[in-house]
Image: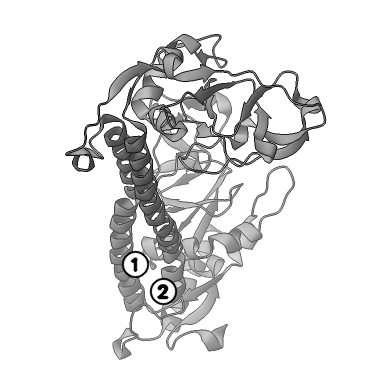
Amino acid sequence: MKKLLPKGWVETELGDVLDIEMGQSPPSYSYNMEGIGTPFMQGKTEFGKTFPTIKKYTTEPKKIVEKGTVLLSVRAPIGPTNIANTQMCIGRGLAGLSSNKIPTNFILYYLRSIESVLDGLGTGTTFKAISANKIHTVHFPLPPLPEQERIVAKLDKLFAQHEKIKKALDRIPQLLKAFRQQVLTQAVTGKLTEQWREGKDLEWRIEKVRDVTNYNPRYSWDDQTCLSFVEMANLPIRLFSPLKSIKRKFIDVKKGYRRFSNSDVLLAKITPCFENGKSAVADGLLNGIGCGSSEYYVFRCKEGLLPYFLLFHFKRTVFLVEGADNMNGAVGQQRVTQEFVLNYEISIPPPQEQQEIVHRVESLFTKADAIEARYKILKAKIDSLPQAILHKAFKGELVPQLPTDGDAKDLLDEILALKKEVKEKKK
């Protein structure tokens, strides 16, 4: 390790340069949520991005750490860190690490760079934890103090920029969701094909679902006929997603399951599947037929209505919200009523315009899917960036080493001397 360290750095251990205080829980009867006594933290439950949120207090604190102490979670999960934003009592799920000579953020950043290492040092079956001895012996690369300060300043700047990028990136899923909903709204209101329709004698009409579909059509097949069985878990939320199914014989699923065939529209009726938008056009079924959950409504479109055009209506947020307001049944087992769905009014253009609309919606959703795929790749890279930055920082590759920095050995000797002095005074 020493050969890999930059010039002027020294390899030491956490216990040599930091004051490490293992937490100790006060008696449970001393806890309160009214702000009486000393702020108390048992573990990482109240951790934030950098500072914790104090919710609990104790009137009989056992182990107290000062403001600015780095808090390390030492019981599962092992490794997460925060900085104490006030004097507080810490329980056995935490350890406090501090130093009068090393910047708090330098300690914090280093511990975050080795979070997985710390987790690997944990032992135990019921509650995995890391002992004080193991924390003390964790390697710690120590640069000269001026370089530590430059590293912290650089990391602060980079992570502030990273946070801005991450927040901007995190908006993309909601923007894509809103875009898809806007496309569906324009599709079923005629705005999507407004220019295409100019000069054509095409009239839209308003119909109830019951009048343009056959509701839960009855099918019967030979007992040995193989078909596709579609579980509720495989009914997609996303539009144009393929139906996943397993092969079954009709005799095995003829009782207690809903029957359907290719081009039927499936709609989940039970909460929360309905609110989540689980619905699809049955397509690619084995032998063109299938069975699935009894919690499906099945609709076979009559002549003049394309299945996907009906599905566009079912996928709209306005339909799902209104449907959720029209449910009955016990809590946790509520279902959207068939009266609501069958009486739901939909706008329908002539078949040729429906075909054009389906084509355009599919094209726009494909573009949105491509953007989403690129977003996921970029997000994975952005999420992995902090560890890459921290890795460079503690290899001495993030900021330049300057001749005026001196040697970290002098800093280490000073810290060790101070720790020895304090220890002798305690004796």
* 236 or 209: nearer the viewer: 209
Which sits earlier in the primary sequence, circle 2 or circle 1? 1
The N terminus lies in quadrant:
bottom right
* Residue 243 appears left or right of 367: right
**Residue 67, placed above or below residue 262:** below
* 194 or 412: nearer the viewer: 194
Residue type at numbered disc 1 = Leu
* 158 or 281: nearer the viewer: 281
Percent across and percent down for residue 393 are 41, 74
Mark 2 near mark 1, Cβ–Cβ under 8 Å?
yes
Residue type at numbered disc 2 = Ala
Badge count: 2
Percent across and percent down for residue 76 are 61, 47
Percent across and percent down for residue 148 are 36, 73
Q: Is label 2 in a helix, a strand or a loop?
A: helix
Residue visible at 47% across and 42% down in the picture: 240
Residue visible at 25% across and 31% down in the picture: 202
Q: Is residue 373 visible?
A: yes
Displayed quadrant of residue 175: top left
Count residues near mark 2 (Cα–Cα under 10 Å), then give few for <14, some for 14-19, many for 20+: many
Count residues near mark 1 (Cα–Cα under 10 Å), then give few for <14, some for 14-19, many for 20+: many
The C terminus lies in quadrant:
bottom right
* Residue 275 appears left or right of 22: left
Q: Is residue 337 visible?
A: no
Residue corresponding to mark 1:
155
Q: Is label 1 in a helix, a strand or a loop?
A: helix
**Residue 137, placed above or below residue 365:** below
**Label drawn at residue 393:** 2
